[in-house]
């Protein structure tokens, strides 16, 4: 086929594009700006255009695949409609690409990428030769977010945003948790959990759900589905190189997967013991000011923020923890406002950046950043200051906030990754 991908630089669609190119399809695409992922796609022979005005959409394309960030009235989607090209969202296309496989889908509010990464490491070391699509980059995948395997196993993250995972046909599901997110789309927590029930009920006869039955939300969802459930909490916590109980809990799911696939637990434990994290998941990117360790992390939900900061505090004690946080979308920040204000108690100082407005077409309210800072300071007992940009945050950190021996955690799902990487080259 000839496939055109709009928003090809995103972590999900880039993996799909590369996978389909490796399968022999003719793939091209577009995005708003160049990044490391796009440069990697180009090195593989995929043409990427940095203009999305519609002029690059091939008239003879068989399939137009778009990122969720590309709205229906975007020029490229309108041009594809004009040409009569079949259109699918990224997850719609992923569903088609994986439908002939035994799909292992990893879902959950938090921990999807880390759990998928651990499962990938295990499946590779155990000789399963899986096809993989993951929302991060792995050393095990040569620094990439995809792999074309030769077996009938397909491992993929299953994202709940806009019920995207319902496009998938899983044989096995790993559910990390389901406490709630994306309330710009979901009406409430009940609607959110209903989506997970819908996804799990797609399992075929003989399929299974692997989850944490000690988690009240997971237990409630699992017991509503009428499927075979494997309780990962019955297994011991594995040893990992990356810190945090939340990471060990993710590892438990992979131990349970190994058992379900009939693989000796020692094989899985050995694979997990070498797991040292992945891109943007408690990733140590370097040092600054000779002795300050700089960590980049994707956490953007209150529970992720709290769990990650607590794990880093424990791992690096007694060093001072400084966090630079970029909230991700106004709607999420406001919907989970009170939880956010209490999530920073494990850090000593917080530099708060403006909200990364990833969904400006759907945002209905805006966050008062100064009030947010004051409320965090009161609830989390951390020193908080606001900044107006990444450059201003970098200057504040280097000039007045950071002290010798600190640990700096640059946290958020938006452009703050650029701060983590630029500050180490200072």
Image (spheres, rainbow, N blue to C red):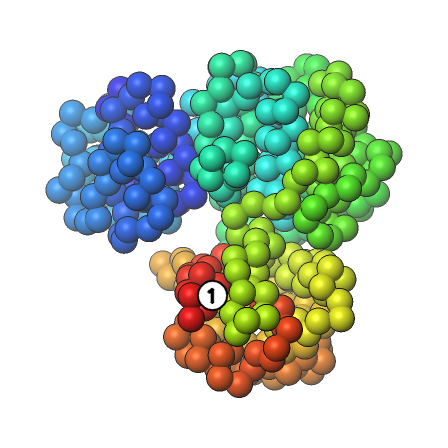
- For the question of whether residue 330 can be seen, the reply is no
Q: Residue at x 76, y 50 (%)?
A: 245
What residue did someone put label 1 on? Answer: 424
Residue 61, position as x, y percentages in the image: 21, 26
Q: Quadrant of the N terminus?
A: top left
From this view, report whether residue 85 is shown above or below residue 286. above
Q: Residue at x 45, y 23 (%)?
A: 148
Closer-to-camera residue (320/237): 320
Residue 234 lies left or right of residue 69; in this view the side is right
Left or right of 189 in this view: 4: left
Q: Residue at x 25, y 24 (%)?
A: 26
Q: In the rendered image, which quarter is residue 120 located in?
A: top right
Residue 230, given in percent of the width and then of the height, sits at 79, 28
The answer to whether residue 70 is visible is yes
Residue sitting at 45 percent across and 75 percent down?
A: 394
Q: Is residue 275 left or right of residue 133?
A: right
Q: How many marks?
A: 1
Quadrant into which the C terminus falls: bottom left
Residue 213: % across, % down: 81, 38
Q: Is residue 348 above or below residue 308?
A: below
- Number of other residues with Cα within 10 Å of mark 1, as a class: few under 14, some 14 to 19, many 20 or more: some
Residue 373: x and y in percent read 58, 80
- Find numbered disc 1 in the image and state the secondary structure of the residue it sits on: loop
Name which quarter of the figure residue 4 lies in: top left
């Amino acid at each position: 086929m000839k496939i055109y991908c709009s928003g090809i630089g995103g972590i999900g669609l880039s993996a799909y594009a590369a996978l389909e190119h490796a399968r022999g399809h003719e793939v091209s695409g577009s995005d708003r700006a160049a990044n490391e992922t796009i440069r990697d796609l180009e090195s593989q022979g995929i043409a990427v255009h940095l203009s999305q005005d519609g002029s690059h959409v091939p008239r003879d394309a068989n399939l137009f695949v778009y990122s969720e960030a590309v709205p229906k009235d975007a020029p490229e989607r309108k041009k594809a409609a004009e040409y009569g090209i079949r259109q699918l969202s990224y997850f719609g296309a992923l569903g088609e690409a994986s439908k002939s496989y035994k799909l292992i889908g990893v879902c959950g509010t938090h921990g999807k990428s880390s759990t998928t990464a651990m499962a990938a490491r295990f499946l590779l070391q155990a000789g399963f030769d899986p096809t993989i699509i993951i929302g991060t980059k792995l050393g095990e995948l040569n620094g990439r977010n995809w792999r074309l395997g030769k077996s009938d196993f397909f491992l993929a993250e299953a994202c709940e945003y806009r019920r995207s995972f319902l496009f998938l046909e899983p044989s096995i599901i790993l559910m990390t948790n389901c406490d709630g997110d994306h309330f710009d789309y979901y009406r409430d927590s009940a609607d959110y959990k209903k989506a997970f029930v819908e996804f799990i009920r797609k399992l075929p006869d003989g399929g299974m759900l692997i989850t944490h039955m000690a988690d009240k939300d997971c237990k409630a969802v699992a017991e509503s589905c009428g499927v075979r459930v494997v309780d990962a909490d019955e297994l011991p916590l594995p040893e990992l190189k990356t810190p945090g109980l939340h990471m060990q809990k993710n590892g438990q799911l992979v131990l349970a997967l190994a058992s379900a696939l009939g693989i000796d637990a020692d094989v899985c434990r050995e694979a997990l013991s070498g797991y040292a994290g992945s891109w943007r998941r408690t990733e140590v990117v370097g040092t600054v000011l000779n002795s300050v360790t700089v960590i980049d992390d994707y956490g953007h939900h209150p529970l992720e923020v709290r769990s990650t900061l607590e794990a880093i505090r424990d791992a690096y004690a007694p060093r001072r923890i400084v966090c630079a946080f970029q909230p991700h979308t106004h709607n999420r920040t406001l919907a989970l406002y009170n939880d956010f204000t209490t999530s920073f108690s494990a850090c000593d100082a917080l530099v708060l950046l403006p909200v990364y407005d990833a969904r400006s077409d759907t945002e209905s309210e805006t966050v008062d950043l100064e009030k947010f800072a004051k409320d965090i300071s009161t609830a989390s007992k951390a020193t908080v200051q606001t900044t107006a940009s990444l450059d201003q945050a970098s200057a504040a950190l280097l000039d007045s906030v950071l002290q010798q021996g600190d640990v700096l955690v640059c946290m958020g799902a938006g452009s703050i990754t650029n701060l983590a990487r630029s500050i180490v080259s200072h």
